Image: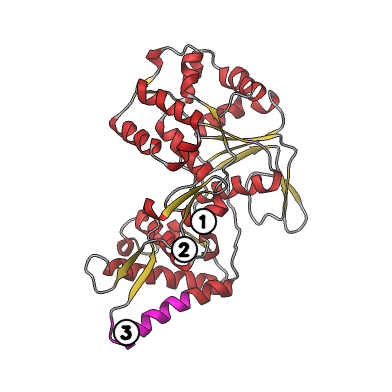
Amino acid sequence: MICVFNCLCFSSEVLEAIENVIQGVVQSLAQKKAPVLTLANRTDWRNIEFKDSVGLQMIPRSTIKQIRSDCPQSAKRFALVLKILSMIYKMVQSNTYATKRDIYYSDTLLFGSQSIVDQIINDISCMLKIPRRSLHILSTTKGFVAGNLSYTEEDGTKQSLASVQDILDLNSHAKFMLIVEKDATFQRLLDDDFFSKVSPCIMITGRGIPDLNTRLLVRKLWDSFQIPIFTLMDADPHGVEIMCVYKYGSVSMSFEAHHLTVPSIKWLGLLPSDLKRLNICKDALIPFTKQDENKLASIQKRPYIACQPLWKKELEILAATKLKAEIQVLTSLSSDYLSRVYLPNKLQFGGWL
């Protein structure tokens, strides 16, 4: 499992930033004004710009949104932001940590849902301009990593990597990294002894949409080793979306793009064009849903697609056929086709975009 602890701000900076917010609230009350919290509107595409070297990042002068204490629609959210700010302040002071789920379960009736807590934590990170991991809030571990990778702990003990925590040094002889969309595919490659069929490598899965820790680890490995990174996703809009999150980032976390994105990532498979090339039977393909059509149309409009003409062609194949395929479709050719033929050939002959 992946668990990355990497505080980028000193505790004093975090405490000072929170104190400044509270001071603003107190000053408003002293002036008999309704307190207002102001932050960049991090989910608005108008606040996002695309750069090849970074991905999606928030523009310096972005539009803002206000969380007002005197508005019925936002008063509760205002209170919840202050509640979580107070919890963060105590954790930073005492050098303790909590997961997002810990925070939600500390008062489920007050918060209402986990998604509300998640949104507020990201809002706070954006408002304070402090990375979420510096707020002493962690995500429940989700991703997995395997392969030619070890690290050194604080006491100097060298460990092979089962989890990443308090890393001092990363060591690897890997020639490339492979990001796998699904846990089932990740486990199948392990069962097929994929590592014995190719050069030394590191394999990572975020088990679907990657959490912050998985994205941080991918970026950390890229910064450390500067080796090629390939993605293995389903040939569908959802798989493309996940790949884009690793490569270019997401709108909601664009304010942290410099720490999370790896624009050099390559699309190894499963390419929509592979389905015809490999003569995959149409009966093995899955018709698009309306949600798939909407997702694909949204991706095709994004600024980074204009810079990827070969990606654009693959998306056009999906749009024209309105058929998608999971990686498991390759088992229709043979049970171990993915690890024995597909991936080794792609890696040897350069079948990536």
Tell me the residue at 48%/43% (across/down): 245
11 on left or right of 118: right
- Real-space Cα separation, disc 1 to disc 3, in angstroms: 32 Å
Sequence-wise, the earlier of marks 1 and 3 is 3
Colour style of the rendered protein structure: secondary structure
293 on left or right of 337: left
Under tag 2, what secondary structure? helix
Q: In this view, does 266 lie above or below 220?
A: above
- Judge whether residue 23 is colored magenta: yes
Residue toward you, 172 or 295: 295
Sequence-wise, the earlier of marks 3 and 2 is 3
Counting from the top left corner in percent of width and height, residue 351 is at 59, 23
Tell me the residue at 46%/13% (across/down): 280
When asked about the image quadrant of residue 336, the answer is top right
When asked about the image quadrant of residue 85, the answer is bottom left
Give the residue at mark 2.
Answer: 125
Amino acid marked by disc 3: Leu
Counting from the top left corner in percent of width and height, residue 72 is at 21, 68
- Judge whether residue 100 is colored magenta: no
Under tag 1, what secondary structure? helix
278 on left or right of 26: right
**Label 1 CA crowd tier, 10 Å (few <14, some 14–19, many 20+):** many
Sequence-wise, the earlier of marks 1 and 2 is 2
Tell me the residue at 53%/61% (across/down): 131
Give the residue at mark 1.
Answer: 256
Q: What stretch is highlighted in magenta?
A: 18-33
Are circles 1 and 2 on residues that touch, CB within 8 Å?
A: yes
Amino acid marked by disc 2: Ser
Residue toward you, 38 or 57: 57
Q: Which of marks 1 and 3 is in front?
A: 1
Residue 10 can be seen in this image: yes
